Image (tube, rainbow, N blue to C red):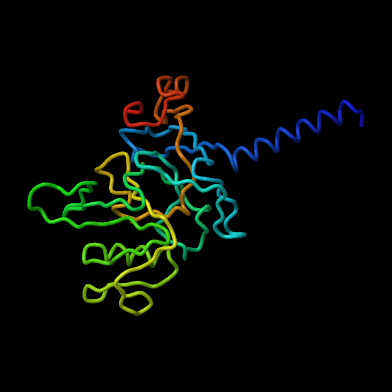
């Protein structure tokens, strides 16, 4: 092999490794597969994800569990990709091998939420006399008091993501069979909302999302393919390189 050929192979190998590293550790693309993200997203959007935004999550989690270098919190209003939290930590697959969801952070650890009887969520107590429950999103290593409003939510979270069995018996939160008045959570938790408030496939259904499930911040719609458009005009030119935000991404 000549020196020139050797250098060519070396450059090619380096480029291939760089692409792999970027996809695993830097920026990747996800596809919006349906219309559940409307009116913000369209079926066929390819959206960039900055995997460094919340710190580097070491993969694969099957080998060494959850490890994140340079962890940073997500803030309210950010659009993010996260793994399916419905199976919890006891599921058959590690978090990083599950489906990818997208949503925006409506509330961060320590924030208080009010949820009324029909599922409307607010960061402020609604005016009027309608019944509503107050929830405080758990913070890592902070003692959270249990109330009649949050007991069921906390029991669900502890059983799914804290590695312990929890239930509510006669209005009292029980962890591993013992009644408790409070609990110190191991993770920070977020309330993730869907793009469409009428689409319940968000924290109203699957509960709080732990920091261990965060993949990265959504950046731009790199390009968008209309699955029902003619073969000669599949690209939605007006959506290319659009920043992910409610204002910019309405169809």
**Direction from residue 162 to residue 205 in the image, left or right:** left
The quadrant of the rendering that contains the N terminus is: top right
Residue 14: give x, y in percent of width and height.
Answer: 74, 35
**Residue placed farthest to the front in the image?**
142
Q: Is residue 185 above or below residue 123?
A: below
The quadrant of the rendering that contains the C terminus is: top left
**Direction from residue 8 to residue 138 in the image, left or right:** left
Residue 84: give x, y in percent of width and height.
Answer: 43, 52
Q: Residue at x 44, y 62 (%)?
A: 186
Q: Residue at x 29, y 65 (%)?
A: 145
State the residue in front, 108 or 206.
108
State the residue in front, 223 or 104.
104
Q: Residue at x 32, y 63 (%)?
A: 144
**Direction from residue 55 to residue 148 in the image, left or right:** left
**Residue placed farthest to the left in the image?**
129
Rendering quarter of residue 40 = top left
Q: Is residue 80 above or below residue 211?
A: above
Q: Is residue 68 above or below residue 251?
A: below
Residue 206: give x, y in percent of width and height.
Answer: 34, 55
Q: Residue at x 57, y 56 (%)?
A: 61
Residue 169: give x, y in percent of width and height.
Answer: 25, 76
Rendering quarter of residue 117 = bottom left
């Amino acid at each position: 092999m000549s020196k020139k050929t050797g250098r060519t192979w070396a450059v090619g190998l380096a480029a291939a490794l760089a692409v792999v590293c970027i996809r695993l550790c830097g920026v990747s693309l996800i596809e919006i597969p349906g219309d559940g993200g409307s009116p913000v997203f369209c079926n066929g959007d390819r959206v960039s994800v900055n995997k460094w935004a919340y710190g580097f999550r070491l993969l694969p989690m099957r080998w060494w569990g959850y490890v994140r270098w340079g962890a940073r919190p997500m803030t309210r209003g950010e659009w993010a990709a996260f793994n399916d939290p419905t199976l919890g930590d006891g599921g058959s697959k590690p978090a990083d091998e599950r489906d990818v969801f997208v949503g925006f952070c409506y509330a961060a650890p320590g924030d208080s939420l009010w949820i009324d009887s029909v599922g409307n969520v607010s960061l402020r107590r609604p005016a009027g006399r309608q019944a509503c429950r107050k929830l405080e999103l758990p913070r890592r290593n902070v003692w959270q008091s249990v109330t009649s409003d949050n007991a069921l939510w906390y029991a669900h979270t502890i059983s799914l993501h804290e590695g312990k069995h929890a239930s509510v018996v006669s209005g009292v939160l029980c962890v591993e069979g013992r009644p408790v008045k409070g609990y110190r959570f191991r993770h920070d938790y977020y309330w993730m909302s869907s793009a469409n408030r009428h689409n319940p496939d968000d924290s109203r259904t699957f509960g709080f999302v732990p920091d261990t499930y965060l993949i990265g911040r959504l950046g731009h719609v790199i390009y968008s393919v209309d699955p029902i458009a003619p073969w000669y005009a599949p690209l939605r030119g007006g959506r290319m390189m659009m920043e992910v935000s409610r204002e910019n991404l309405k169809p």
